[in-house]
Structures are given as structure tokens and as C-alpha cells.
Amino acid sequence: MLYDDFKPIVDLVFNNWTALQLAVEHGMGAPGGEKTAQLMSVYVARYCVENVVDRDDLTELLEDLMDEEFETVCHDNSPKEVSSLLVFFLGLLKEGRHDELRSHIEAMPKCQKWLSEPIHESVPPQCHGNPDDDTTSSDDDDDNDEEEQQIQPNTEVATTSNQADGVEPMDEDDLEPGWTVVRTRRRK
């Protein structure tokens, strides 16, 4: 079956995708990022096999998945590169050019397989959104307000643009251990 041959290729490409690896390692998005990445791999493999895909559609899908599942926007053009590779490899696989496919895969940079062997029987995400996302819920808004008030002070980020707004930047000595002040550079 085409899916069984293509799925390991998607895993290999995802293992080489630095943006995805960093999003998982740094806990972007919901907890359980590695499992989300595994399910994303299943979803992308099925999407490619079951549809007629082109690079632009697949790029958009990858960008949406990274944004919605990992709260990550890739400004490095990597979703386009990943989609180009996947479409190319799928084309070789469909045409039965296995020797050429194998040589291209062997020419890829060797990487640590940080994305463990995914569960093939798992149900991939049915849509890009997270059904457990509280932003679409209209339950007790008062409870959510209390949670937000508790979270907000810990997530403040001081930037140099705050100085222009009359807001004083946070003093690095006032931060709890483990927090970093992030400053942006002014563009001239």
C-alpha cells in the first residue's frame, strides 16, 4: 500500500525539520508535542496519499498545522522546502522509481531520529484546530478571567519598543529564576 511506503519517508523528512523539532523540544502549543508531531506525520502522509497534492497546498497545510498545533509561525520558508521534498518523494514512489528514491533519501543529511516511531493506528487530527482549545469555549468566563490574571504577570516580555510607549522595561534582577528578558532591535 502506498501509505505504508510513504509514511516512513514523511517521518524521515519530519525528523530533519528543525522548526518542528524546536517546537516540540520547547513545548510550543499543547503539552505532548512529540505525540502531536507523530499524529501530524500520520495526517500529512494520509493527506498526501489520499489527495492530489501540489507543493503550494501542502505548504499551506504544513503552515496551518505548525501554527495551530504548535503556535509556531515559520519565517524560514521551511514548510515550502518540506512540502517540496514530500511531493518529490511521493512522485518518485508513485512512478515506481524506487532506486532513484532510495538514492535521494540516502543523500539526505543523517539526523537523530528524535521523532520516535509513530503509532500508525492512531487517528490523525480531523481538522487543523484543537477541539480542546479554550478560546472557542463559552463556559464560565469568570473562571477563565481568574486564570488569565494568574498567568499574565508571569508572561510579560519587556521590549525596547515599550520605552517609546512610556512603559518601563522589566529589570532583569526582578525576574524569577528561569525567565529571560527578550528585547527587539530597532530597525532603521
Image (spheres, rainbow, N blue to C red):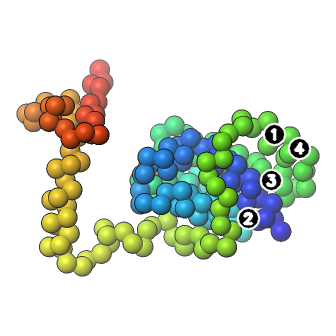
- For the point 85% across and 46% down, the residue is 101
Residue 24 in percent (x, y) is at 49, 50
Task: Classify 10 Å Cα crowding around label 3: few (below 14), some (14-19), many (20 and above).
Answer: few
Residue 33 in percent (x, y) is at 49, 57
Lateral position of residue 125 relative to residue 71, left or right: right
| Mark before the other along the chain sequence, 1 or 3 | 3
| Mark before the other along the chain sequence, 4 or 1 | 4
| Mark before the other along the chain sequence, 3 or 4 | 3
Q: How many marks?
A: 4
Please identify the quarter of the rendering in which residue 182 is found.
top left
| Numbered disc in front, either 3 or 4 | 4
Q: Quadrant of the N terminus?
A: bottom right
Give the amino acid type for the residue marked by disc 2 in the picture. Val
Please identify the quarter of the rendering in which residue 42 is found.
bottom right
Please identify the quarter of the rendering in which residue 117 is found.
bottom right
Task: Classify 10 Å Cα crowding around label 2: few (below 14), some (14-19), many (20 and above).
Answer: some
The residue identified by callout 1 is: 106
- For the point 74% across and 53% down, the residue is 9
Proximity of marks 3 and 4: CB atoms separated by less than 8 Å: no
| Mark before the other along the chain sequence, 2 or 4 | 2
| Mark before the other along the chain sequence, 2 or 3 | 2
- CA–CA distance between discs 1 and 2? 22 Å
Q: Nearer the viewer, residue 147 or 183?
A: 147
The residue identified by callout 4 is: 100
Q: Quadrant of the C terminus?
A: top left
The residue identified by callout 2 is: 49
